[in-house]
Structures are given as structure tokens and as C-alpha cells.
Image (tube, rainbow, N blue to C red):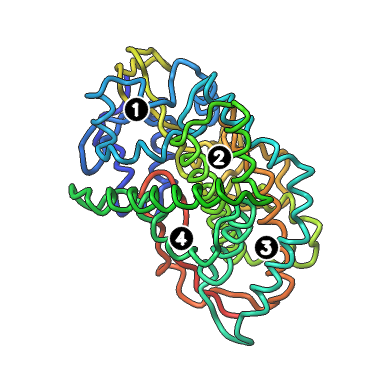
Amino acid sequence: MSAPAHRFDLWSPEARVDPLSIYARMRRETRVARVLSPTQQVPMWVVSRYRDTQELLKDARFIKDRYKLADEDRLRYFRVEEIGQIDKHMLNADPPVHTRLRSLVSQAFTMRRVEALRPRITAITQRLLEAFPPGGSVDLLEAFAFPLPLTVIAELLGVPLEDQDRFREWTTTLLSPPRSSNLEPLRKTVVQFQQYLQDFLDRRRAEPQDDLTSALLAAEEQGDRLTPVELTSMVFLLLVAGHETTVNLVTNGVWALLKHPDQLERLRGEPSLIESAVEEMLRYCGPVRHTTSRFALEDTEFLGQVIPAGQMIMASLLSANHDPEQFAEPERFDITRTPNRHLSFGVGIHFCLGAPLSRLEAMIAINLLVQRLPRLRLAVEPSTLRWRTGLLIHGLERLPVAF
């Protein structure tokens, strides 16, 4: 049996400030917790332990494609029908559709291709650091963590970088929970983003370039059966996921270093530790709080609990990465931690395709940052920092630093 829904309020102010305390209680009390979404008050199920998370993410009984659900069940969770024009991508697909979609972009994210981006990522990082005011202060998220990965993914896709402010506004709206029952702002954002992507794809069809978008269009023409909606959805996914994860990995990672000055000084003195440092950042304060949604097509028994047909289930990656059954002293931030088999990029067939790129961007960005700014420090009281709302993204709203 699961714990009553009201016992785990994952949207409360407490959860925003200190989610780990709630997850620790959840891990102790139940393997599958039933919670209620704050606006619709519909049931959702959450797994919080490390091994249970692994089990859920590999369990093919739970589907990703929400359009296999009955209309009544789907609309209980997704009330903006227009989103169907941008969400038919590989993250929301099951085999064999998932296999086909993933294969189309996997070549762009091989280790060899990602490593070839190292000089460009380094150059962008150096340019951003050189723009910092000498002896001043900046919002590290705004001035550094956001523009770096967005520039990289925009160049890969061929998307005009001058549109970055629009991307950020749209992405923030789409990834944040509605603040009220009024869904019109969300609906408007979906329509605007969809129209932008369709116009962009039309331009690329007319004038192909040496970029990933043109490659996807070429694959479509060669008979891989990518529909127009699939194309729009894939570019949407790559653009959003291609920068959002790294923005929060870099910001959260620097926050963790500033919170633990002994670890910051060790990394500054031993730059070769950056690879294990980034892995610990991914574990300790990873950029994704929960996995995306999965659904039970029929009443499904899982970990001793029946998940009713049509209901949503997800796992807390943040909680799993702090499970003491898997990690010794999980609340200790240790940039030399080994082994460190965190789950921040998922597991199974939906393991994050962009993980190598995100890791490389974070390693270059954070290492150069701590070496270039020896007096880097928080510019505000730690208690004034605010974390974003919602269950998907784990990230700060801003990170003011001085140097």
C-alpha cells in the first residue's frame, strides 16, 4: 500500500527550499508514493529509491506515448491539445517508433562528434568569461550558464542565435507548472513555438545547410517516414533539452562548489579532477528533479502497488541519487567520489542522448570559470537563492556571484 497523497506535497514551499528532506521521508515510508498535482488534483505516482527507479525506467509495461491512452485519461493530465504539435518526439515514444526516431539523431551525438566540438565550446566559454566586468559581479546563470549551451545547440541545429530570448521565454513557460487553472499563456506559447519551428523548417527545406536540421530533413526525404509533426517535435526536443539540462548542470554545479569551499579549492588546485567533479555535481544537485511521465495502459502491479490504468508514474532522480542504500554519506559533496553510478541521465532506452555533450560543456565551462576567477564567491546570502518550481527541472532561478 502507498502512503496517503497528502503526506508528500512536492509542490510546497518546503519542497522548493529543501526537497531532500521530503524525499528522505518518502524513501523510508513507501516504495511508490501517491501524490496529487496542485492545479488539477489528479493522482500521480512517484518512485524515490535508487533500485526502484532503475526498475521503473526499464519496465516496458509503462508507456511513454500518451496518445495510446483513452482520451479521458490523457486529457486528465494534458489539457492543452495544441501541445500535440511539438511533443511527438523520441522522449515521448515507445519502440519501434522510439527506435526509429532515436537512430536519426544518434550520429550527431557520438563521442567522436562531441569531442570535435571541444575547441568551439572552449572558445565560446572564453568569450563569455572575457565579457565579465573586471572585479565585478554577474548573474552566472544569465551571463554564462545559459548562453553557452544554447549557442552550442543552436549552431548544431542551425537555429538563429539572435532568437535566444524567445527560446528562453518559451522554454520557461513550457517547463514550469501553470500558476493557475488559466492555460491560455501555455497554449499561446505552444502555438508561437510551433509556428516558429515550422517556419524555420520551411527555410531549411528551401535552403539546406550543413547542420543537424538539414540532416533530419534529408533523412525524411530518403524514406525514413518522419512526418512533419515528428520533425517539428524533434527539433523542439533537441533545442530545449540541448540547452536546458546543461544550463542547470553548470549553475547547480557552481552553486555546490561555492557551498563547499574546500571542494572548490581542491578542484582549483587539481583541474584534472573535473571529470569526477562533474559526475558528483550530477549526483548531488543534478539538473533534472524527476523523470518525464510514464503511464499504465492497464491496471499494473508494481513494487506491491497497483497503478490504475491511465494513471501517471514517474521517478525522482534527485531522490534516487541521495539514496543511502546506494551512496555512502549521500549528503556529502565529494568531487572525488568513486564509484558514482548516479541516475541523472536516466537508464534504459531513454538514457539521455545528449549526455556526452552536456558533460563536455560542463567540464570545460566550470574548469575555466574556477581557474579564471580565483576569488569567485556568492554575491548574495545563500538563503535568498530560489529554486524553480515544478517537478521536472531542478535549477536555480538565478546565481549572483562576485569575483
Q: SS class of the residue under badge 2?
A: loop
- The label number, if any, that marks residue 312 in the structure image: 1
- Identify the residue at image location x=42%, y=31%: 314
For disc 1, the neighbor class at 10 Å (few under 14, some 14 to 19, many from 20) is many
Check residue 366 in the rendering and tell me which mark sits there, or answer none.
Answer: 3
**Dividing the image into 4 quarters, which one contains the N terminus?**
top left
| Residue type at tag 4 | Leu
Any mark on residue 396, and which?
4
User: Which x, y percent locates residue 372?
Assistant: 72, 75
Mark 4 or 2: the one toward you: 4
Question: Residue 215 or 279: which is nearer the viewer?
Answer: 215
Q: x%, y% of residue 129?
A: 66, 75
Instruction: Find numbered disc 3 in the image and state the secondary structure of the residue it sits on.
Output: helix
- Please name the residue shown 43% across and 36% down the image: 229
Residue linked to disc 2: 321
Measure the C-alpha gap from mark 2 to mark 3.
21 Å
Sequence-earlier tag: 4 or 3: 3
Residue in the image at 60% along x and 44% along y: 329
Task: Tell me the distance, in whole angstroms, between the alpha carbons under discs 4 and 3.
Answer: 16 Å
Give the CA separation, mark 2 to mark 1.
22 Å
Residue 4 position by quadrant = top left
In this picture, residue 75 sits left or right of residue 126: left
Amino acid carrying mark 1 in the image: Met
In the depicted structure, whether residue 263 falls above or below residue 370: above
Mark 4 residue element: loop
Q: Nearer the viewer, mark 2 or mark 1?
A: 1
The answer to whether residue 318 is seen in the rendering is yes
- Residue 212: x %, y % from top left: 63, 46
